[in-house]
Amino acid sequence: MQLTTVLLLSGLVSLAMSGYRDRENKKPPLELEPVSHVSKSAGQEISGLAKSYRHEDVYWAVNDSENPAAIVPLSPEGKVVSASGRNITIPKAHNIDWEALATDSSGRLYICDVGDNFSRRKQLQVYIIPEPSLLSSSTPEPEIIQIRYPNQDTSGSDKLLYDCEAAFVFNEKLYLLTKRLHDAATSLYRLDTRKRNTVNNLTFMKTYPIKGYVTGADVSPDQKTLAVLTYRALWLFHDFPNDDFFDGRKTKIPLKGAGQIESIVFTSAKHLLLINETNNEIFSIRLNVE
């Protein structure tokens, strides 16, 4: 079944975005109901999603810590679509706390090992691989980019500011949005260097008072809308100048009935697919962007 069919059957709510010129436009709560479930063979805790550039109607997923160092190709309905029906392993990779997944227009996947609940990890990394064939059982060896936040004190004196569960690619650069447990804001960082055999300092961009714990993010295919998830809301950032995402129009949509959603991906400029971490349920949202 094609994604468009699934969206039509799910009775989606259309969200009019054309009128939110305010600095922060608040929408009524959106009640979500699952349209499908991820197959159990995909893993127990989906923590990141990215749309495939190589395969039509395929979405790559990763699982959280204590799961194999692997990626999983999914259909929009949550079925594992590799030839083996299993995940595709990544050699020389370690799943310490994989929390986000992104892809660029060249079909490279960015697997972000950036979870850090206590802001004390001394080594974070991003694994970069080309999208594999669905016939493959493993990927090529990844490019491993070690990263750190500028001025972070990993001794524990920082006030829980450096956990991260959200990443996206914009204009071919990787961005990270932190989950600040200290103040429920989020800080935006950009990866400007990709040097090997050394630690790359992220570039700090801006902090935004998002009033929630950020669990996922993605940019629309036309690069005009940034969608950011928190535990209880979907934020849409639109009409931003360059990569100053928080300086454009903003819409906050409270979410109800979906549990703790930790993965989000644009399936098209007007559709979002979401997966909650607790039950691996799939949800869909249709955006009316005019």
Image: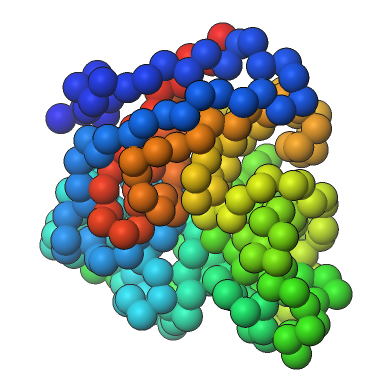
The C terminus lies in quadrant = top right
Residue 139 at x, y percent in the picture: 36, 67
258 up-or-down from 199: above or below: above
Q: Residue at x 52, y 54 (%)?
A: 215
- Viewer-closest of 158 and 198: 158
User: Which residue is depicted at the point 79% across and 51% down?
Assistant: 207
Query: How does the figure colour the protein chain or chains?
Result: rainbow
* Percent x, y of residue 213: 59, 55
The image quadrant where one finds the N terminus is: top left
- Residue 29, visible in the rendered structure: yes
Position of residue 281 measured from the top left corner of the image (x, y, whole percent): 26, 48
In percent of the image, x 36 and y 50: which residue is there?
A: 259
For the question of whether residue 81 can be seen, the reply is: no
Total labels drawn: 0
Relative to 204, 35 lies left or right: left
Q: In the figure, is residue 57 to the left or right of 180?
A: left
In the image, farthest residue toward the right: 151
Q: Is residue 240 above or below residue 80?
A: above
Q: Looking at the picture, tell me which residue is in the foreground, 106 or 13.
A: 13
Quarter location, residue 14 = top left
> Residue drawn 79% across and 84% down?
157
Which residue, as the protein is rendered here, is positioned at the far bottom?
Answer: 155
- Where residue 225 sits in the image (x, y, percent)? 61, 29
In this rendering, would 211 be left or right of 165? Answer: right
9 lies above or below 156: above
Name the foreground residue: 164 vs 42. 164
